[in-house]
Amino acid sequence: MARSRTSALSVAVALGCTAVAYNLSAAFVGSSPQLRGGPAVARGVGTDYLVRNGPKDADPPAVDTSKAAGATVDIEFKKRPFGIARYVPGANGKGAIVRDVTQKSRYPGDPQGQAFVAGVQPDWVLKSVNGQDVSGMDFFVIMQMLDDEVMDPVTAMSLNLKASGVKTDLRNDGAERTQGEKFAITSDLDKVAVVDMPAKLVYQQM
C-alpha cells in the first residue's frame, strides 16, 4: 500500500513539473498579453523597455529620427514577434531605431525570422506604423504600440506582477489587508492601443 501511494505521488509530481515547464516555455515564445499570462494582463512591453533592452556601451550616439532622408522599405509583419531583437530611441527620446535584428529564420514562416528575411538592417528608423507617422513619437509609446518583445519567464512574471499587484492576505494588529488593485503600478502607456496583425511598418534609412 505504501509503495502504491509513493508511485502515485511520483506521477503527480512529474505531471505538475511538466505543466509548469510548458507554461514557462510559452511565456518565452512571444510577447502578446496572452503569452505573458492571459488576457487579464494589461501591461504592455513599453513599460521599462530600456531597463530590459538597452542601452549598451557599443551603441552609437542617438540621432534625430525626423531627419532620416534615405530610401524607405515597406514591410508587412504577419504575426508577433517580428524579429527585431532591440530598438533604441532617437534624440530626446523620440522615434525608434533598429539596433539588433535576429540573424536567422529557424524554419519557413518563423515569425522571429520575418525581419531578417525582409532585409531589415540596424540603424534603420521606424517611419510609420499602419500609415501613422511615428518618427517624432515618444519611444515608449511606439514600443507599446508594437508590443513586440520576446521575454524570458522571470521577466514576464515581473511584468505581470507590476500590472496586477500581488494579491496576498496580510494580517496586522488583527486587521486583514489584501494586496491587489490598489498596489498595481499603472502607467499612461497602458492606455496606448496595440496594433493589430498583420501590421504594415515602413522603415527609412538615415
Image (cartoon, rainbow, N blue to C red):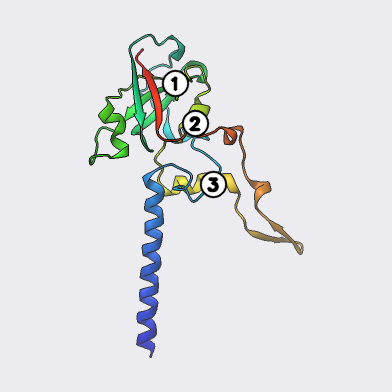
Circle 1 residue: 128
* Viewer-side residue, 35 vs 90: 35
Query: Could you give the CA–CA distance between mark 1 and mark 2, rounded to whole angstroms?
Result: 11 Å
Circle 2 residue: 145
| Residue that extends furthest to the bottom in the rendered view of this protein | 1
Residue 8, image x and y in percent? 38, 80
> Which secondary structure, mark 1?
strand
> Which secondary structure, mark 3?
loop
Q: How many marks?
A: 3
Residue 89, image x and y in percent? 46, 22
Query: Could you give the CA–CA distance between mark 2 and mark 3, rounded to whole angstroms?
Result: 15 Å
Residue 128 relative to residue 188: left or right: left
Callout 2 amino acid = Met
The residue mark sitting in front, 1 or 3, is: 1
* Viewer-side residue, 136 vs 6: 136
Q: Is residue 132 above or below residue 11?
A: above
Residue 57, image x and y in percent? 38, 25
> Which secondary structure, mark 2?
helix
The residue at 39%/40% (across/down) is 150
* Viewer-side residue, 172 vs 145: 145
Sequence order check: which comes first, mark 1 or mark 3? 3
Sequence order check: which comes first, mark 1 or mark 2? 1
Mark 1 nearby-residue class (10 Å; few <14, some 14–19, many ≥20): some
Sequence order check: which comes first, mark 2 or mark 3? 3
Mark 2 nearby-residue class (10 Å; few <14, some 14–19, many ≥20): some
Circle 3 residue: 41
> The N terminus is located in which quarter?
bottom left
The residue at 39%/62% (across/down) is 19
Q: Do the residues bearing badges 1 and 3 touch, measured as CB atoms within 8 Å?
A: no
Callout 3 amino acid = Val
